[in-house]
Image: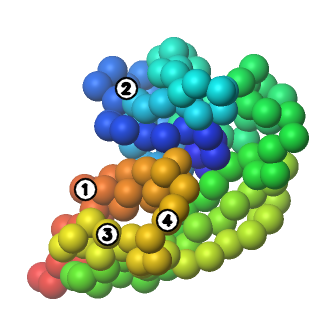
């Protein structure tokens, strides 16, 4: 469940916990958009808060009045052309809202397009990491 203010930009080059189960499947570097000005979080915060989410009350940058505390992504269906992603928005560890998004593998496009740049970046990071890990499993033998 990634933090709703974390915009992943690239897979972290200095992964601290390579075997950790993470919401985006890999540990990402990126920027925090919780403050007035975006900033790059420290590596210790990046793993503990940004990549793992559900940080309300733990991370000093997380707004107290935030409607959602994290996002969870799941591949509901896949084939050679697309991934169907179920995105669940959580508040205090409980599902708050959800929707389905289609990721076109050939073009790297989301359908419908996601207007929120943080959510869009998280969806694209999740899909990229998923395809790196599981695409060979989806190929016919």
- Tell me the distance, in whole angstroms, between the alpha carbons under discs 1 and 2: 17 Å
Instruction: Name the residue at 81% across, 51% down.
Output: 67
- Residue 81 place in picture, x, y as percent: 24, 82
Q: Nearer the viewer, residue 130 or 123?
A: 123
**Residue with the mark numbered 4:** 114
Q: Nearer the viewer, mark 3 or mark 1?
A: 3
Whichever of labels 3 and 2 marks the residue nearer the N terminus, that label is 2
Instruction: Name the residue at 44% across, 71% down.
Output: 113
**Residue with the mark numbered 3:** 109
Whichever of labels 3 and 4 marks the residue nearer the N terminus, that label is 3
Whichever of labels 1 and 2 marks the residue nearer the N terminus, that label is 2
Q: Nearer the viewer, mark 4 or mark 2?
A: 4
Q: Which image quadrant is residue 27 in?
A: top left
Q: Nearer the viewer, mark 3 or mark 2?
A: 3
**Residue with the mark numbered 1:** 132
- Element at label 2: loop
Whichever of labels 4 and 1 marks the residue nearer the N terminus, that label is 4
**Disc 1 packing (10 Å; few <14; some 14–19; many ≥20):** few
**Disc 2 packing (10 Å; few <14; some 14–19; many ≥20):** some
Instruction: Name the residue at 52% across, 48% down.
Output: 118
- Tell me the distance, in whole angstroms, between the alpha carbons under discs 3 and 2: 27 Å
Q: Is residue 58 left or right of residue 47?
A: right
- Tell me the distance, in whole angstroms, between the alpha carbons under discs 3 and 1: 17 Å
**Residue with the mark numbered 2:** 15
**Disc 4 packing (10 Å; few <14; some 14–19; many ≥20):** some
Q: Nearer the viewer, residue 111 or 134?
A: 111
């Amino acid at each position: 469940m990634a933090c709703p203010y974390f915009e992943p930009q690239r897979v972290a080059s200095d992964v601290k916990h390579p075997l950790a189960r993470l919401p985006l499947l890999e540990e990402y570097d990126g920027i925090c958009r919780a403050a007035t000005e975006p900033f790059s979080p420290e590596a210790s915060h990046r793993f503990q808060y940004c990549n793992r989410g559900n940080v309300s009350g733990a991370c000093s940058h997380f707004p107290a009045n935030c409607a959602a505390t994290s996002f969870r992504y799941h591949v509901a269906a896949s084939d050679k052309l697309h991934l169907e992603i179920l995105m669940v928005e959580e508040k205090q560890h409980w599902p708050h809202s959800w929707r389905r998004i289609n990721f076109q593998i050939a073009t790297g496009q989301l359908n419908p397009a996601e207007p929120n740049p943080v959510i869009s970046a998280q969806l694209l990071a999740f899909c990229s990491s998923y395809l790196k890990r599981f695409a060979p499993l989806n190929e016919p033998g």
